[in-house]
Image (cartoon, rainbow, N blue to C red):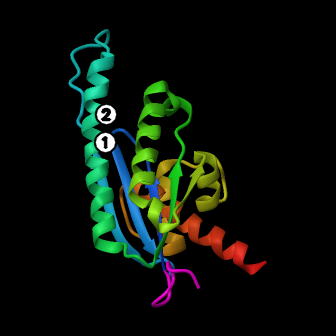
Amino acid sequence: MDSFTQGGKMKKLYIGIDLSFTDTAIVVLDEKGNLIGEYHVISQARPKTGKKDKESPMEFLDRLEIYRAEVYFRLNRIRKDHIGNNTLVKIGIEMPMGTYGSVKMGAVFASVVTLIWDKFRFNYSKIDCLMPTQLKKFITGKGNSKKNTIVKEVFKRWGFDTDNDNTADAYGIARWLIDTEQTKNRY
């Protein structure tokens, strides 16, 4: 037994993150699938002044810095409230794709992944990334389901009630982590 597991059974937490620059949802489940915490990071909206007025790189970087600070605060809260020395943390993130797969969203994604690694690397963390179609197929059985279908299926399958599609995605990601681990342990 190594020093990480000495003194008792190792606790496992599963963190699902639905990354969005407008409403990032973070859901924390224990190894039995019980909800431990639900968090949101709402990005500062960019004022719209007209169709041709695009966000400058500096405006985007300013918004990204504020967003990073908010994500950092939430991750710190999760760490302080729920994670001790004997906690194994598994994290799943939905990858940006399609319209969200822009250079800006790539910067947001990379920024958040580095924050996650910084906060949880000492807990034998593993970060898994899911494509949106992979997550939809896991939750609904179809890789092209609409957001409202995902919200309904999350409630039907696991009894988790939310009206927020980002929260439903984050919950589904955390459940995917649990299911994937249980499947691997069966064989």
Q: CA distance from mark 2 to mark 1?
A: 6 Å
Quadrant assignment, res 180:
bottom right
**Residue 10, position in %: x, y?**
50, 82
Q: Secondary structure at mark 1?
A: helix
Seen at 25% across and 28% down, the residue is 62
Q: Amino acid at mark 2?
A: Leu
Task: Locate residue 130 relative to residue 60 in the image: left or right.
Answer: right
Quadrant assignment, res 43:
top left
- Whether tag 2 and tag 1 are in contact, CB under 8 A, the answer is yes
**Residue 154, position in %: x, y?**
50, 65
Above-or-below relation of 105 to 112 = above
Q: Which mark is residue 155?
A: none
Q: Looking at the rendering, in which quadrant would you find the N terminus?
A: bottom right
Which secondary structure is most common in the magenta stretch?
A: loop
Tell which of 47 and 62 is nearer to you: 62
Seen at 47% across and 59% down, the residue is 121
Which residue lies under the disc numbered 2?
Answer: 64
Q: Which mark is residue 68?
A: 1
Task: Locate residue 157 relative to residue 182 in the image: left or right.
Answer: left
Chain part drawn in magenta: 1-10
Q: Which residue extends farthest front? A: 3
